[in-house]
Image (cartoon, helix red, strand yellow):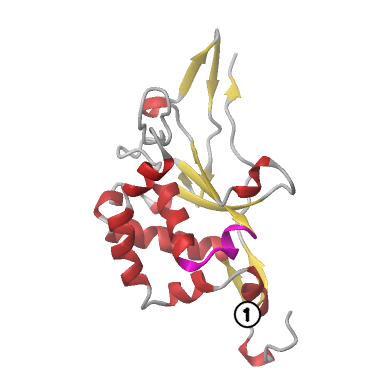
Amino acid sequence: MNATVPRERVAASINVTDVLTLVVKEIAGRSESYRHIDAGRTLVCLSSNRAGGRGGAIYGKLVPLRFKDGAQSLRYRGRTYTMPRIVYAGIEQRYVVYFYFPRFFDLPAAEKLRVIFHELHHISPQFDGDIRRMGRVKSAHGASRSGFDRQFEREMGVFNEWIADTPYFNFLSMDSRGLMSSFTRIKGRRLKMPRPVLLD
């Protein structure tokens, strides 16, 4: 803990994944294009960037828990695969969204919001466990990532104006050092990244 921070100003603990889940819930409730998202079935987790690896520039990642069009299994090269069933608080999840610590938390507040909107925009409009498919070849982002991001630019701007006057903005404005200076303990859900499982 930073010794320059008065003891009485340091809170006991914070669960950053719980706070980010509340932000996701606000986005789903306030942004028309995200009304299909059920925050109770979109599990927010933390992950860590591998030092020096290709994942070093990754701030977030969405993992769908179904295949194309919400299918529970996939036949590929003569073998059948399924995704593991993830249940949290008694509810079967459709998606897991990861935010990388500390890299995501060291972004400015506006860039944190961009990452959150970007990952949520990958969720299928049917909320069936599949991703939003942008094309036959480059299904995740379509022709370009910048074009993908432009699709949610307006709604992100409107949400940014709203959140600026809420305590959520104070949270988003803190970097990893700020969090460690403000709280004696930083908690967050961690879950091994789900991957397809061979059935036969």
Quarter occupied by the N terminus = bottom right
Q: How many marks?
A: 1
Residue named by callout 1: 182
Whether the magenta-drawn stretch holds residue 176 is answered as: no
Q: Is residue 130 above or below residue 41?
A: above
Magenta residues (range): 102-109
Q: Residue at x 48, y 67 (%)?
A: 109
Residue 158 % position (x, y) = 28, 64
Q: Residue at x 47, y 54 (%)?
A: 115
Residue 163 % position (x, y) = 36, 71
Quarter occupied by the C terminus = top right
Q: Residue at x 59, y 70 (%)?
A: 175
**Left or right: residue 23 compared with residue 49:** left
SS under mark 1: helix
Q: Is residue 39 above or below residue 200?
A: below
Q: Report crowding for label 1: few under 14, some 14 to 19, many 20 or more residues within 10 A (C-alpha).
A: many
Q: Residue at x 38, y 74 (%)?
A: 164
Of 124 and 191, which appears nearest the observer?
124
Residue 68 % position (x, y) = 40, 26
Q: Residue furthest top?
A: 78
Residue 30 % position (x, y) = 28, 61
